Amino acid sequence: MAIRERSRSKGLGITVFIILLLTPIYWLLNMSFKTNREILSGLTLWPQNFTFDNYVVIFTDSSWYSGYINSMTYVLMNMTITLTVALPAAYAFSRYRFLGDKHLFFWLLSNRMAPPAVFLLPFFQLYSSIGLFDTHIAVALAHCLFNVPLAVWILEGFMSGVPREYDEMAYIDGYSFPRFFVKIFMPMIRSGIGVTAFFIFMFSWVELLLARTLTSVDAQPIAAIMTRTIGASGIDWGVLSAAGVLTILPGVLVVWFVRNHVARGFALGRV
Amino acid sequence: MRKVPDNRAWWLVLPVLLLVAFSALVPLMTVVNYSVQDIFGPGNAYYVGTEWFRDVLRDERLQASLLRQFGFSAAVLAIEIPLGIGIALMMPKGGIRASLCLILLAIPLLIPWNVVGTIWQIFARGDIGLFGWGLNQLGFNYNYTGDPVDAWLTVLLMDVWHWTPLVALLCYSGLRAIPEAFYQAAEIDRASRWAVFRYIQLPRLKNVLVIAVLLRFMDSFMIYTEPFVLTGGGPGSSTTFLSQTLTTMAVGQFDLGRAAAFSLVYFLIVLLVSWLFFTAITHMDKER
Amino acid sequence: MLDWMNWTQPVAIFFVVIACILVAMSVWELASPCSERRGFLPIATTRGDRLFIGLLCAAYIHLAFLGLSEISLWVALAVSVAWLLILLRWG
């Protein structure tokens, strides 16, 4: 009896929290379906004149939707680069003891902790001097600064969960290292790779400071384009909200695909 | 896990090393170079020694911004960690409802940071935002663009909204790792709810909590985009945190030497704190 | 290509010295591997850990001298080196 009551109050608590969590997002959604006149004329809890105009603005203007394409491009590039270099490194950290391993690991992590603002100027100079300014690859490389250490950290946790015996058995069966790694080891830590990809996506997608500084026109991320809604006549709240809603969607899709591994991944594979 | 000593493992780490050296070491060296010079343009720089450092360390505006930063990070931790634990304890143990909770909780984490700022910019406005409008209807004189205290609290609330789910998800996965037998034993002993939490759940949460505290401290310590969009650092400088001070200095005023010296001091603080946390984590791993 | 980095002599010397220390420590480690031990520091450390702690302390010592006093930085450097050696030997 008491237990049932407790679980009911628990359910109530979590429901209330999630409703509070979603209210600001609902408000954004609400605004995105209103006309600017309705937004400014007074507060309404749901759109009175339901309209898709704000979304039409975004999907018909190439400068708007190219922002989404730019963001997606550098996020995917970053995911590819990060996973390619982080997988072998994480394997090394999880399986071997070598000269300076712990210090190297800490040095990697300290880059995850370093404020991007510190690296802002030199990045700008660096990528300008090698002619990569305003390209997708520049942003992708810059985001490696915090994504690679994180990826190594998460993957190392997952890999440590796979017993060494698998490695040794594969070597006895005559597998070479690359073949063992791709054919046997990677499928075993599939969920770990999925979670890592999720995190790389997340941190690259939400970052703005570096992405904005390293681009001007051709590779500008959507987040930077959003500031354009502030025009001479004030802020275009409707379009701004619609653009905001559209930036949330990719994240929701990704989290839906990895939902079963999210919690485990959030503990960085170390539980 | 038993690890084999083998220095050939360096070859596996080499790509990461080169990549991170390119994107971290080269910029770091540049920052150190800038910090000892007064730079007017390419090829037009004067060596000034440690003047910038002396300047930065004694700049009261920067000290104030540093204090504000520590205050903010402390407040963030004090609210988000207990709240996150509480949420994790309330979450359903499994099934479709647990998945649903996880997805809904993860949503704020996946919103680009400037959009987080935009959401709250709209939500907290007195005229068109539900939150600001609601508070004003209830008789509070709330205005985040005019009142420093309101602005500070709004930024704090935004951060709690944005990042408490991360703490909750971390703790949730920690709680799931506790075997059911522990709870059954506690039930047989007629342990109180508090005793279960204190002696079964909390010790098992220790590891994830360290990670949560580490991530939350670091990320709140470099917070930039959200308050920049929401308040622009104002009113006055009540919500100007370290990253924003630095960015204004470097990009806004193009004061390269001073910004570089400031960057290095900032980086040293972060380095010390992350080393302390890292040592704590590795020593916990060892104890297990 | 390296113009934008604005290299200056003192900074170059600084990085060369750090690199030399790292190389020397690696060679030493290869020649005679060290094991973790407890000194006066509250945690068990290896040689490399103590070097890192020493360098971090050195940075803070320099900042303290700059921020709080007008004493020459050479004094700070001397204090740092002495502290680093103490750490490496007894830490």
Image: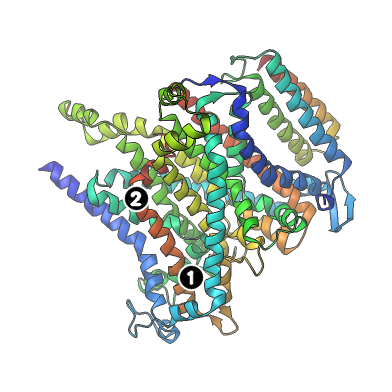
Which residue is at 46% across, 45% downward? Answer: A196
Residue labelled with disc 1:
B143
Visible residue check, residue C57:
yes
Q: Is residue B150 left or right of residue A49?
A: right
Residue A236 position in % (x across, y down): 51, 80
The quadrant holding residue A267 is top left
Residue B118, compared with residue A161, is above or below; it is below
Dividing the picture into quadrants, the one containing residue B21 is top right
> In the image, B30: left or right of B216?
right
Q: Amino acid at mark 2?
A: Arg
Tell me the mark number nearer the camera, choosing from 2 and 1.
2
The image shows residue A112, relative to residue C71, as above or below, that is: below
Q: Chain of mark 2?
A: A
Residue at image coords 49%, 31%? B281
- Asked if the residues shown at circle 2 and circle 1 are in contact, with their CB atoms under 8 angstroms apart, the answer is no
Q: Residue at x 29, y 50 (%)?
A: B99
Q: Is residue C1 left or right of residue A26?
A: right
Type of colouring: rainbow
Res. A259 mark: 2
Callout 2: SS: helix
The amino acid sitting under disc 1 is Asn
Residue C71 shows in the view:
no
Other-residue count near label 2 (Cα within 10 Å), few / some / many at <14 / 14–19 / ≥20: some
Real-space Cα separation, disc 2 to disc 1, in angstroms: 38 Å
- Pick whichever, B191 or B215, lies toward us: B215
Q: Using the rendered view, name the quadrant where residue B181 is placed.
A: top left
Q: Residue furthest left?
A: A1
Q: Quadrant of the C terminus of chain C?
A: top right
